[in-house]
Structure formats: C-alpha cells, structure tokens
Image (spheres, rainbow, N blue to C red):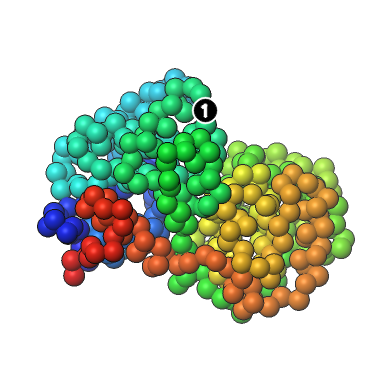
Amino acid sequence: MSRRITTSAGRQGSILVVTHLFPSDEREIRGPWVAEQVDALGRLLDVRVLCLSPTASDRSAVRRSGVPVTYRSIRTRFGRGRIGLLASSVRYDRALAAYLRSDPSVSLLHAHFGMPDAIVAHRQAERAGLPLVVTLHGDDAFKVLPRRDPIGRALRRAVTGARAVICVSSAMAEAVRAVMPAVDPLVIPNGFDDALFRLSHEPRDLGLLFVGMLVPVKNLDVLLRAYALVRDRVAMPLTLAGDGPLRAALESQARELGVAGSVRFVGAQSREEVAELMGRAVALVLPSRSEGWPLVIAESLGCGTPVVASRVGGIPEILASDAGGILVTPGDVGELAGGLVEMVERPLDPSRVAAASRARPWSAQARRIADVYLAVLDGRPDAAETEIEP
C-alpha cells in the first residue's frame, strides 16, 4: 500500500507525476522507465500519475503496484506541426489545471520530460502554489534547452522555476549546466527491473539484437550497412525488436543490401518478451547518435548480455569496464562493423558482463527520488533527517 508523505513540518500529501509518455493497455511500450519508477515509488509514497497525450484515451486505471493512473487525451485536429503542438499544449494545460482542482491532496508535481510536460507543469505549479520537480531524459536537455526560440525559453523558465532538476546521466547534467550555469542538476540515473532483467543461462541462439523505436536517432540504417559488411564473419542473425516510422524503409534497405534473409523484424514486444530476447542474444546493439540513459543497455547487462553501442550520452557511464561491451563512434559504419565482429568472437561470460554494469535496480533509485521529494517539501538541500511514515 502506498504511504502518504509526512515532512518534518508534519505536512501530508501526495505526489503527482505528470507526463505525456506512459504505458497503457493500447501502447505498453510507451515510457516503461517512467512506469517502473512510479511503481517503485508507490511502495514508498502516495504517488499518482496523470498521462496527458494525443494518443491517450480518457480513462482511469490502477497499476498492479497500486499506483492510480489517469489518462487524458490532448488530441487536436491540427496534427503534429507547430500549430498542433501549441493546440495540444493548451489542452494539456487545461487538463492539468482541472486535475489539480479535483485533487487537493497533491503536494508536489513531478514532470517527466521537458516539452511540453515541464513547461506546462511549471505554469500550473506556480498557479497552485506547489513545488515542482523536473526530470530531463535526453533531447529535452541536449537539444531543446539551448534553443533560442519561444519553446527553448519556456523550458529554461521551467527549469529555473523547479525546486529540483533531475538528469538521468552526468553527460546530460553537464549539458544543462553549459546552458544554465546557475542550475545544478541532480544526477539520478534510471533504474531497471532486476526481477525481470536478470542473469540468463539460456542458450544464446538469437544472435545480435536491437531493441527500441525504429526512428532516425537510432541510426539503424548504419547498423544494417555495418551488418551487411561483416555478415559472413558474424554468421548469426540480427533481430530488430520494436516498431516505428522507418520500418518499411529499413526492410527495403535490408533487401537491397542482400541481408533480408538474416534480419528479422519482430515488431513491438512486451517487457517480458524483451527480457526473453535479451536472455537469448549474443549481444545487444544500440548504434544511436543521441541517448540519455538508455534503459535497454542496463537491462541487457542485467541479463548478462554484452552491448555494442555508440559512445554517446549516458552509455559510457553505465559500462564500468569493457567486459560489458564495446563503444563505437556514432555513424561510423566501419567501426560498428568491427565492433560486431569483435563481440561475436569474444567468449561470453554472462556473470562477468553483469558485473560490468553501474546500473542499479529501481528499488535503490526510487529511494533517492523519494528523498528528493521530501527535501523539496521540507525546503532543505538534502533529505537526511526526513522519514517516510511507516
């Protein structure tokens, strides 16, 4: 059962997590790291979730952890362009305001992602007199925050107005400080579900594996070209688990490169299915040109499966040693191809791979986030003397 927050001043209340990216029955793969975080937090505190998304349907649900989730659609008829973003942000603002009016127990807002979540949550937190915590996950810190347009300025105002800013990697925190030297973000990496992504002793019969959205930032065209260069030396299939707008183009590219017979597109997978795939893979490949703290790297290492990944974002921070994998320059086809060959020729020691990870389970990371909430509510720089009511 979730527990009400009790600060050192005796104030009680609940945490409202606000985000546009959260799993639902229709789209289980959307933002699983946010869901797993709130599940872990729900064992410590009274946490609720408000998911405001163009793809959501209006409804309420309760997760198996006991955390209640409210979904509200902010879909408009203006599509995904600038006008559509503005219109959906207006609906986001109104829906959040309505929720806060309906639930006076909310004591703190926690916005996941910068745009539109932190921008809108900052406006409503100021109106309601509530403290705001913001977590930045990737491009919101690396690309949106430095922008000199109204969106960039609005995000900088939100970050300035937040009582605590959490970044999921040190690289991201450095990017924030470079733009906003007066802001000192906390670095709390995402955790992983160690009950699901655990050391596997299954036969490694799957070959190479990619898990993620089939979108440009993942550099999957580079992966296919690298794989085609060394297909004969690698002598194992490549499985792409995930879906997205590039699927048809990537399937066509695989045919043009002559590797369609060795490349499997298996579509979106459940969390349990992803864990099963990782436990059977020889290596996970993540050739992205940009990442925050990619959960798939932590999950793969938790399964004892090494990685071949780009040297970007928080990825080097997750790997404690090269026993966990090989880092390559993003976009370099030859270097990625060499990394694939080197990895498949290595003897695989799953226990040694798992030990090379700096990632921690959600049970540990949730406690750190709960301490941030309590420190913010108490107006303290740390949470050393604040306890959670048993």
In the picture as drawn, the residue positioned furthest to the left comes out as: 10
Where is residue 81 drawn, in percent x and y?
A: 50, 23
Depth check, front residue: 3 or 280: 3
Depth check, front residue: 268 or 147: 147
Where is residue 192 drawn, in percent x and y?
A: 47, 63
Q: Residue at x 63, y 41 (%)?
A: 217
Q: Is residue 100 in sight in this rendering?
A: yes
Where is residue 320 drawn, in percent x and y?
A: 61, 67
Q: Residue at x 43, y 46 (%)?
A: 184
Which amino acid type is marked by label 1? Arg
Left or right: 263 in relation to 50: right
Q: Residue at x 31, y 53 (%)?
A: 381
* Residue neighbourhood size for the residue with mark 1, other residues' Cα within 10 Å, grouped as few (<14), some (14–19), many (≥20): some
Left or right: 114 in relation to 321: left
The local secondary structure at tag 1 comes to loop
Provide the residue designation for mark 1: 147
Quarter of the picture containing the N terminus is bottom left
Q: Which quadrant holds residue 73?
A: top left
